[in-house]
Amino acid sequence: MAIQMIFCVETNRRADTDSIYIQETINHWYTVSRKVKISKIYMNSKAKYNAREVVRGIARMSKEFVLGEKKVIYCIDTDQYERDAARAAELNEISRYCKDKGYDLIWFCHDVEEVFQGKKISDSLKVQEASKFRRKKMIAEIQEARLSCDEKYSCSSNILNVLDKYLLRKQ
């Protein structure tokens, strides 16, 4: 059966860093058939998770894909949620929103760069480091356990848990 996966990412179209890590993960661990369409919505900030342009983008992409299932997947950095009550509240609000809408939530603790690079990366270097990650095929160095967590801790994510629901793992 055909499936469209709409990834709502925090980055912007110009930088597109989050998508690099997500696509590298998909390419490394999964076999993706032609029946899978991967689409992206750039939120420019997680604060815009329910902004009119994001909601409209999801609706528009869903209408364009007439065959099969549509899955909306939010990809969110947890930031320092355990140290900052406002960030924890925002993360809980986004989690509740996804649950209410029937959307999946992929989280990166504390951010996507920390999960895949193992360190904090300054904003000015994010594009360069993501490109290097892809070019050097650094995804092969990432431990599967770090990407299939149920609990949030530094350098962890649940990305494989979510993707396993919709994609077939490579043998």
Image (cartoon, rainbow, N blue to C red):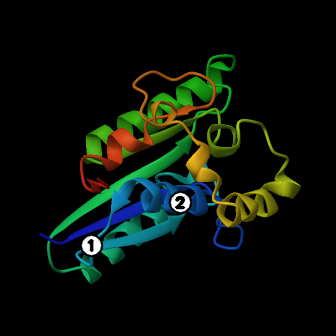
Q: Depth check: give the residue in front, 117 or 8.
A: 117
Q: Residues within 10 Å of mark 1 (few under 14, many from 20)?
A: few
**Cα distance between the residues tagged 1 and 2:** 16 Å
Q: Name above or below for residue 147 compared with residue 51.
A: above
Q: Is residue 128 left or right of 103 when viewed as pictured? A: right
Write the residue at 53% across / 36% down: 143
Residue closest to the eye, 46 or 149: 149
Label number found at residue 7: none
> Which amino acid, mark 1?
Ser
**Rendered image quadrant of residue 37:** bottom left
Identify the element where label 1 is drawn.
loop
Q: Is residue 10 above or below residue 67?
A: above
Which residue occupies 25% across, 79% down? 65
Residue 156 position, x and y percent, is: 55, 31
Residue at image point 70% right, 73% down:
14
In this view of the protein, can residue 112 be seen by the observer? yes
Q: Quadrant of the N terminus?
A: bottom left
Residue 120 place in picture, x, y as percent: 78, 38
- Dot 2 corresponds to which residue? 24
In the rendered structure, which amino acid carries the disc numbered 2?
A: Glu
- Residue 33 is marked as 1
**Can I make out residue 53 in this image?**
no
Tell which of 106 and 64 is nearer to you: 106
The residue positioned 57% from the left and 21% from the top of the image is 153
Q: From the top left corner, tell me how far across and down residue 111 is, in percent.
A: 65, 39
